[in-house]
């Protein structure tokens, strides 16, 4: 997997491609975080899974998350080696790749993964 970057991060360009400024994540004046959400899997007209691009406009780094309708991360996207989700993951990845091409994202070959790590909280009861 590759990490993606956006070359043009002007406010006009990002707004024209569907990105919106995220004031919750842009806590300081030095951070300019933009987000874009779009459906990646639908059942009839109902969206079941969405992808979210999080872009740091200062560093041009693009993070990709896939979430279910409840807002939780869709685990098979992050742990694709477990289970039999290959047909669904192909649909999701094609939709994400199409959107990456639309916004003009380029691959950054610095050995970082395009998927955010799926962090699960450790329960106090699960300690050895």
Image (cartoon, rainbow, N blue to C red):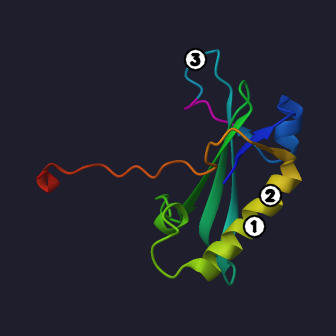
Q: CA distance from mark 2 to mark 3?
A: 29 Å
Q: Residue 95 has which mark? A: 1
Give the quadrant of residue 4: top right
Q: Report the residue that reaches farthest toward the top.
A: 29
**Circle 1: element type:** helix
The residue at the point 67 percent across, 69 percent down is 92
Q: Position of residue 113 (x, y in %)?
A: 61, 48
Does the magenta portion include 24?
A: yes
Quadrant assignment for the N terminus: bottom right
The residue at the point 11 percent across, 53 percent down is 128
Q: Is residue 63 above or below residue 84?
A: above
Disc 2 vs disc 3: Cβ atoms closer than 8 Å? Answer: no
Q: Residue 99 has which mark? A: 2
What segment is highlighted magenta in the picture? 21-25
Q: Nearer the viewer, residue 61 or 39?
A: 61
Disc 1 vs disc 3: Cβ atoms closer than 8 Å? Answer: no
Disc 2 vs disc 1: Cβ atoms closer than 8 Å? Answer: yes
Nearer to us of marks 1 and 3 is 1
Q: CA distance from mark 1 to mark 3?
A: 33 Å
């Amino acid at each position: 997997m590759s990490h993606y970057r956006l070359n043009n991060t002007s406010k006009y360009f990002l707004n024209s491609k569907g990105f919106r400024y995220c004031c919750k994540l842009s806590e300081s004046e030095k951070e300019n975080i933009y987000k874009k959400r779009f459906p990646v899997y639908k059942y009839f007209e109902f969206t079941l899974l969405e992808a979210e691009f999080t872009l740091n406009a200062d560093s041009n780094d693009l993070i990709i998350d896939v979430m279910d309708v409840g807002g939780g991360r869709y685990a098979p996207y992050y742990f694709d080696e477990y289970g039999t989700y290959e047909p669904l993951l192909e649909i999701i990845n094609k939709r994400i790749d199409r959107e990456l091409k639309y916004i003009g994202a380029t691959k950054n070959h610095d050995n970082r993964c395009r998927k955010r790590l799926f962090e699960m909280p450790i329960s106090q009861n699960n300690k050895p």
